[in-house]
Image (spheres, rainbow, N blue to C red):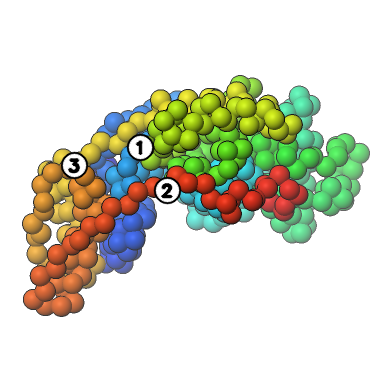
Amino acid sequence: MNGGAATEAIRSASRLDCRQALEALRNGVPNSLAVRLLGSNQEAVEESFRALLAANRHQGMLVSGDFGSGKSHALAHFQELALAQNFVCSKVAISKETPLYHLGWVFKAAVESARMPDRGGRLMDELGEAVRNSARESPLLGWADSAAEQGTLSAIFPATVAIMDRSGDPDHCRAIESFWSGGRIYVAQVRKGLREIGLGKHYRFTAPRVSELPPQQLRFATELVRVAGYKGWVILLDEIELVASYSILQRGRAYAEVARWLGKTRGQSYPGLVVAGSVTEDFASAVISPDGKQDCDNVAPRLRISARHAHLVEAARAGMTALQGECQGLRAPTDAEVAATVDRLRAIYAKAHDCSPRPLDLDSGGAGFEGRMRYKVRAAINKWDLIRLVPGARPATEYEPYSPDYRENPDLGNLDPDDDFEL
């Protein structure tokens, strides 16, 4: 969004909109309102993302920058672009609760955070309703039957589609929606549902292994999104640099997942899935390179000695290669862009608090952490707050730089996501 569009968005925004945008910016977590009202100056990465949407096939991109340079803002802007082009979009922050090395947990978080262009409910509630309202021989059922015959999908998936399509039992529907969202389902309940709709002998299946479910659930959910009338599913992965806190085995698995999400894993494709991720600028040099933790040399041997994970070596290498050489760096803002952004921020503040905040004297220069947009924005909001609440105040801002911590976290190292957890 350019400056003119952002200025027009501010004019049409309500006082509540402006207050919500300010609070998000004050906390350093830009939401859709903040992005819409402030706009974006990252034309190059925006064009790359638009190209991904236009191609609409399983592929992805990575953006990099220092802390405070606008990575989360860029992803939030991508979300608005995706929704405007009729994509379902999810933003997932990598964390202890959503470790990148575990597809099941990340998938479940993506389902929970999903936004739809034209509906405000939860993703699987809305898509399940679409299935129930479709014709009996829906495209989804035909696709799922075919995928099960080819062995790429468990027969339990078309069985659940058939039940969702023909059964009015709310218990069955809730259980199936939970399963489609990344949870478990009892085989006995599926068989009972099939008997109730007269298809008890039509589907033969056993319970899929826990490790086999997440890739199939992701593939099924992406197809479900498309059958429901959307172009595809955009998933935005924020703060990939937290991979550095994992153990070396978990980092190796996380790199393999990076390759999966970006469409770089041989033999694995999720048509309709578009992915963008953010990572700190120095992650590759601090963690992957020979000058850092040397993951480029150490990950593959560590994966090979694990019977469960030896097959991930090629994918892990592909993920590390992408993180080392395929990130698109965010451009540092010019003095003029910083001034224009702060001026728009002043208009947002004025409408939010029904006041006339004075223009601020801005230090020139975009170099160093004090020149990053996050610091400029938060400093401006804090100064206006103090001036409004304490008339006559002459606030000055002291900055303290933040540096990512790339040390391993023992708490994360003790987790074993391959245990039989309930997803």
Residue found 16% across the figure and 40% down from its top: 334
Secondary structure at badge 2 equals loop
Residue that sits furthest to the front in the current view: 291
On the picture, is 236 further left or further right than 229?
left
Quadrant of residue 343 within the rendered picture: bottom left
- C-beta proximity under 8 Å, tags 1 and 3: no
**Position in image of residue 322 (x %, y %):** 46, 27
Q: CA distance from mark 1 to mark 3?
A: 15 Å
- Mark 2 and mark 1 lie on one chain; the one further toward the N terminus is 1
Q: Which residue is mark 2?
A: 405
On the picture, is 123 further left or further right than 44?
right
**Amino acid at circle 2:** Asp
Q: Residues within 10 Å of mark 3 (few under 14, many from 20)?
A: few
**Amino acid at circle 1:** Glu
Residue found 18% across the figure and 72% down from its top: 386
- Mark 1 and mark 3 lie on one chain; the one further toward the N terminus is 1
Q: Which residue is mark 3?
A: 367
Residue found 48% across the figure and 49% down from its top: 93
Q: CA distance from mark 2 to mark 1?
A: 13 Å
Quadrant of residue 199 within the rendered picture: top right
Res 112 seen here: no
Question: Which mark lies nearer to you, 2 or 1?
Answer: 2
Circle number at residue 281 = 1
Question: Which mark lies nearer to you, 2 or 3?
Answer: 2
**Position in image of residue 143 (x %, y %):** 69, 31
**Position in image of residue 15 (x %, y %):** 27, 67
Res 411 seen here: yes
On the picture, is 51 further left or further right than 88?
left
State which quarter of the image contains the N terminus: top left
- C-beta proximity under 8 Å, tags 2 and 3: no
Secondary structure at badge 3 equals loop
